[in-house]
Every structure is written in C-alpha cells, then in structure tokens.
Amino acid sequence: MDSKTIIMSAVTLKNITKTYDNGKVQAVKNVSFEVAEGELFGLIGPDGAGKSTIFRILTTLLLADKGDAVVDGDDVVKSYQNIRKKVGYMPGKFSLYQDLTVEENLNFFATLFGTTINENYDLIKDIYEQIKPFKERRAGKLSGGMKQKLALCCALIHRPAVLFLDEPTTGVDVVSRKEFWDMLKRLKQQGITILVSTPYMDEAMLCERIALIQSGNILSIDTPGNIINSYPTDLYAAKADNIHQLLNDARQYNEIKTAYAFGEYLHVSFKIQEVDEFEKYLTSKGHTSIEIKKIAPTIEDCFIERMTETSQGVNIEQGAGNKE
Amino acid sequence: MKELSTINNKQSTSPAIICKELTKQFGNFIAVNKISFEVATGEIFGFLGANGAGKTTAMRMLCGLSFPSSGEATVAGFNVYKQQEKIKKNIGYMSQKFSLYENLTVKENIRFYGGVYGLSDKQLKEKTEELINKLGMQDQLNKMVGELPLGWKQKLSFSVAIIHEPKIVFLDEPTGGVDPVTRRQFWDLIYDAAARGITVFVTTHYMDEAEYCNRISIMVDGKVEALDSPANLKHRFNATSMDEVFYQLARGAKRSAD
C-alpha cells in the first residue's frame, strides 16, 4: 500500500456463500473481505478450503448462491462482461493451448483482449525473456516451471487491473517457488493488485495481508505480522535425541496444551507456564540432550491454533499415533 | 560406495533397497545418472529433488514399473530386471494423484485392494476392522470415498497401501495440499508403520517433513548430490534449515521438467 491518500478497494466480497451438489457441499460459507488497490493479498489454506471457488466467483465464471462481490468497481453478476476484460486469471490447472507454441499462445491471448505483445511488453519482459529461447516450442512440451511462466505472461498481456493467481506454486520445488514470488513482487511495484492463493503456509509471509481459510470459513484476516502477534500463548520449541518418543511423552503430560512435530523440533504450549517442570518430566522419562526454547510462532502455528480453536471437532492428537 | 555399504552392517536384516549405479536413459537424455544408495529395513528415507531431477523415473524403476538402462538394484531382496512381479507383490504404493476409487465405498476399496494383494477372506475381515478402528472411521465405512475430505482420503489411502504388510511402502508426495493438522496425523501413521518394520520411501515438497526422515537424499539433474541425516546435512551445508540445504543444492540445477 503506497502513499495514496484514499485507498480504493480493488476486490470486495460480502457474505459470499456457495454450495455444490444441491446444497450438500458447502464450499464457501458467508465469506467477506476486501483487497485494497495495489495490494498483494494471499488466500492461505489447504485443498478443499474454498480458494478456487472464490477465484471462480470473482472472475465471473461461477455464480454465488448468496452475497455480493465487486471487482475493480464492477459487480460480478451485473457487469461480468466489464470484469472479464480487465482481470487476469491463472487457474490452478494449466489451461493454455498445449498444441500452440509459446509465442502463439501469447499472441492468441493478446489478440483476444484487443492488444499486442509489443504494447504491454514492458510488463512481461522480465518473465518472458526467461522462456523466449523456447518460443517455438509447443506449450504442452514445456517443463512445469516454464508452463507456469508462460501462463503468467498470458494472464498479464492485457495489463489487467487485478491479477488472480490460483495456487501458482503448487507442486513446484523450492527454487522455482522463490523465483515466482520474486516475480510477483516486481509486478506489485507496477501497481497491479494481486490476489494469490497457496497451500504453503511459509509463503504467507510474502503477502501484505492474508486470509487463513479452512473448510469454506475464514479463520483470520490481517497482516502476517499481526496474525503472529495475536497468537494466544507462549510457544516453545523442544527437541531431544528420540524425537518421536518425545512427542508421545509430551502428549501424555498433564499441563500440555498443544504438542506437535515441526521440522526438527516439536512445538509445544502449556495450559499454565511451567517449562522447568516440563523439562524435569522429560528427564524423568529418560530423554537425553533435551533442548527447550521460547520461539515466535509461524503462520503455520497460527493456522493450527485457529483450526483447533474453531474446529469442527478437529484435534491434532486424535486419530493416529501411539496414544494409549 | 564403500561408505554406503557400511551403513547397514549393524542391521541383522539385509537392506530393504540396494541401488548401485542405477541409470535410465531416454535417447540422449540421462534421466537418472548412476545413483547409488541403500535403505535400511524400517528406515524412513526421504527422496527429495527439484522438479525434473529424475525422482519419478528412479521410483518407477524401484517399483518394478520400468527397466533400468544400466546398473543394479534390488528391492525387498528382488532384482529390478528379473523379478519385477515379485517386487510389486512386496511393496505398497500411494501418491497424491493415484489413490482410491472415488465411487466405491470405504469398505469396498479396502476389499478391492486387499483382494488384489491376495488377502484371504479372514485376513480381509480382520484387517478391515483393525484399519477402521485405528483411523476412527467406523461411521464412514459405507460412505463413498469421493465424499470424504482430502485428509481422510489420504490417511485411508496410506492404510490401504500397507494392508498386505509390505516390506516397503513408496509414498509419492502423500501430503500435497493437505491441511497442517492432518499432515501431522499422516506422519504419525508413517512413524507407526516404520516402527512395525515397514520401510518408508517418501518424496515431499515440504521441507519440514524432510526433517522427519531418518536420512534423506537430494537429487539434482539425475544424480544423488547429497545423502545423510537431516542434522548432518545442515551441518555440512552450514544451514539452519533443510530449506536452505535444498536451495543451495538445487539452485545449481540445469534441468527443470515435470
């Protein structure tokens, strides 16, 4: 959000609800949020959270059951034709023409939107130059990373006001993911509003504001920093030589609130503060090389906390493991 | 090579997987380039690599689905050239993409896969009960698999993949797109299987999950560029996370494909 004095909403959703299968499946439940002009906004959640449904409603490809949505000043139902001209959409599934070459695809989309590659070349230059050596290659023969770059070029070629990216980094390795987010930062600098979804919690930190979403419900909306600051308890990382046994023992401990694996550590929180007692307990259980330290929560910790707090009966310790 | 073969000397059982200079070439393109490693019985082995590094090709050879161009490998003691069918009977496999039949019920899926792996009616009955109790899915038994949430599907799919108590289970990105709570429950199941002696060979894009493996290998451009415990790898690359280790290795990759 730059130094603009009045920040307009590029995207507004009010009480959007969408069901499938005659109301049996509730994909999106009464969701409301706004994305400011020029903002990089992330929808963070696992498969089945409702992310793609929200994208399809906003790009006028799907009608909501209830609620209103406005994109760049136009209503998604009444003025759907206007919206289609000025948004860019990159669906989760690769949707370009596999039989056309890289250049033919790009030309096709430019023509469709009444423009040319040259007219907006400055916008896609950085990205397109990386795939230009393969411009004669058919899109179907490109690697995953290159397909992703071409799809982004095609979504940008008409200089859209709002860019919708539905899980652009799913199934992509760490290196390509980093490159992709660098590209998004540069696009943001050009003033394009970006709504992006991802199942990778670590990518949340790269957005200005995020909505955590699960089973069609928004769990929280805020800046990543504020979401982390509002984590309700102190959080500790713990490890010992036998980490799996440590997890089982931690879960049996009376004063434990949550305990779950997180990379090489466990993340644990307590009902009441008693780290020293916990350490004594672990020692009495025969653990060696015990390390416990206070840490700042990650977005994934916040997601887990919101999920278990608001849960539809979800319990992290339930359903598996060696619980007795 | 010498280093690799010493890993399992302590084990009384032979390694679950032995790979020696295993290679697969398509025309001029060397998809898998002389990879060598051993996986111990009961080990959780993470098989990582950038897109296009050759993971899928290597896995297909180890599962008895494709013949190597050269090199040697045995899986569960069976030769990848001559005993492909025996390999298939002694392994389990699941991936994010291929799992269960959506329009069969939970019970029918269990019966189908149990049948394919040659379980008797009695074994099937016992296994079904055990599996359902363990997953707490008593109420879902007669539901279509397509109606289950993704997390449940993946947990069921894993349990079905090991219904015949295979020596090794291959997991190809089993937790992609799954919520963080279910992802952890899934790893509880993996630990459980490993504790029962089932060897786990797993690929993932989540670097925190790499930490849950006993050892991991990282493939770059068809070669295994690193193989060790997560702690040792972080130490060697002077990195604080597996993410960094992976990034340092994969950044130099020349190939990028699916």
Image: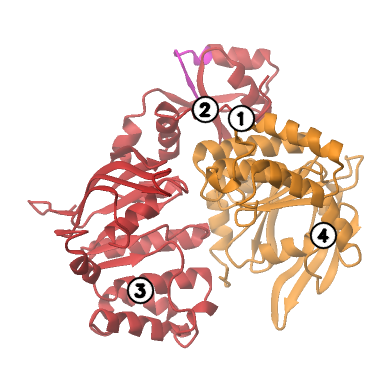
Residue tagged 3: A153
**Where is mark 2, residue-wise?**
A315
Magenta-drawn stretch contains A306: no
Q: CA distance from mark 3 to mark 2?
A: 42 Å
Residue pictured at 80% horizontal, 66% vertical: B22
Marks 1, 3: nearer the viewer: 1
**Circle 1 residue:** A319
Residue A56 position within the rendered picture, expressed as x and y whole percent measured from the top left: 34, 58
Mark 3 vs mark 2: give the one in front. 2
Image coloring type: by chain
Extent of the magenta region: A267-276
Q: What chain does mark 2 sit on?
A: A
Q: Which residue, as the protein is rendered here, is positioned at the far bottom?
A: A136
Quadrant showing the C terminus of chain A = top right
Badge number at residue B75: none
Q: Marks 3 and 2: CB-CB under 8 Å?
A: no
Q: Residues within 10 Å of mark 4 (few under 14, many from 20)?
A: many
Residue under numbered circle 4: B19
Residue visible at 68% across and 33% down in the picture: B132
Q: How far apart are the two marked residues, 4 and 1, measured between alpha carbons?
A: 36 Å
Residue B38 is situated, as x and y percent measured from the top left of the image, at: 81, 53
Compute the Cα span from label 1 to label 3. 44 Å
Instruction: Report the amino acid beneath label 2.
Output: Asn
In this view of the protein, can residue B235 be seen by the observer? yes
> Which label sits in the foreground, 4 or 1?
1
